Image (cartoon, rainbow, N blue to C red):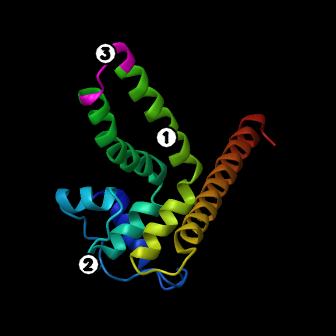
Amino acid sequence: MTVLEQEHTAAMTDPTAEPGTPDEPIVRPAPHRWLWYAFGGRLPARHRSWVLYDTTTSTWGLRHVARSLVQMSVPIILILVLLPAGWGLRAAVAGGGLFLGLLYSLAYMPETTEHRVVKAGYPSGTATAHRDHTSVQRQQRESERKHAAAAKRAARYRDRSGR
């Protein structure tokens, strides 16, 4: 388990955490199950907490893009292999399709990830609420860190100036 997964698990087992978050451990799916998940399939119940982790961790946007690229790989490969044209046109068509696919994927990223969480058995809005809650906590920690650093600098300045 990575450090991020451990922190996420600790946050999820916190009694003050928002409702709808599980107490079960994060179980990463096997590669073939992840491919099924990337193509929109539902994972078994034991991976339920991993789906929430996958859609709410700090790298959830990159994970979404990776899933989108996996989905788009099939038509892109088919275009590159089967299109009866020169390699320049094949590459242009594949690039255009990749661009448009990523554009739509990014435009609907919150809705798509929320749908994955709902398919895993959570109420609608859980992923967004969890990301918002985590963001507020991160901002509070950063604010406290900056406040402590400013107090330390002020104390150093007072000590140097003899006040």
Q: CA distance from mark 3 to mark 1?
A: 22 Å
Which stretch did the figure color magenta?
82-89
In the image, what residue occupies the spot 56% across and 62% down?
Answer: 111
The residue tagged 2 is 46
Q: Quadrant of residue 160?
A: top right
Mark 1 against mark 2, which lies toward the viewer?
Answer: 1
Q: Name the residue nearer the viewer: 4 or 88.
A: 88
Q: Tell me the kind of residue under disc 2.
A: Arg
At numbered mark 2, what does the secondary structure look like: helix, strand or loop? helix
The residue tagged 1 is 102
Q: Quadrant of the N terminus?
A: bottom left
Label 1 CA crowd tier, 10 Å (few <14, some 14–19, many 20+): some
Q: Quadrant of the C terminus?
A: top right
In the image, what residue occupies the spot 26% across and 76% down?
Answer: 44
In the image, what residue occupies the spot 46% across and 54% down?
Answer: 60
Q: Tell me the kind of residue under disc 3.
A: Trp
Q: Earlier in the sequence, mark 3 or mark 1?
A: 3
**Numbered badge on residue 37:** none
Asked if residue 154 lies left or right of residue 49, the reply is right
**Residue 140 in picture, x, y percent from top left:** 64, 61
Q: Quadrant of residue 125?
A: bottom right
At numbered mark 1, what does the secondary structure look like: helix, strand or loop? helix
Give the answer, above or below, for where 92 lies relative to 17: above
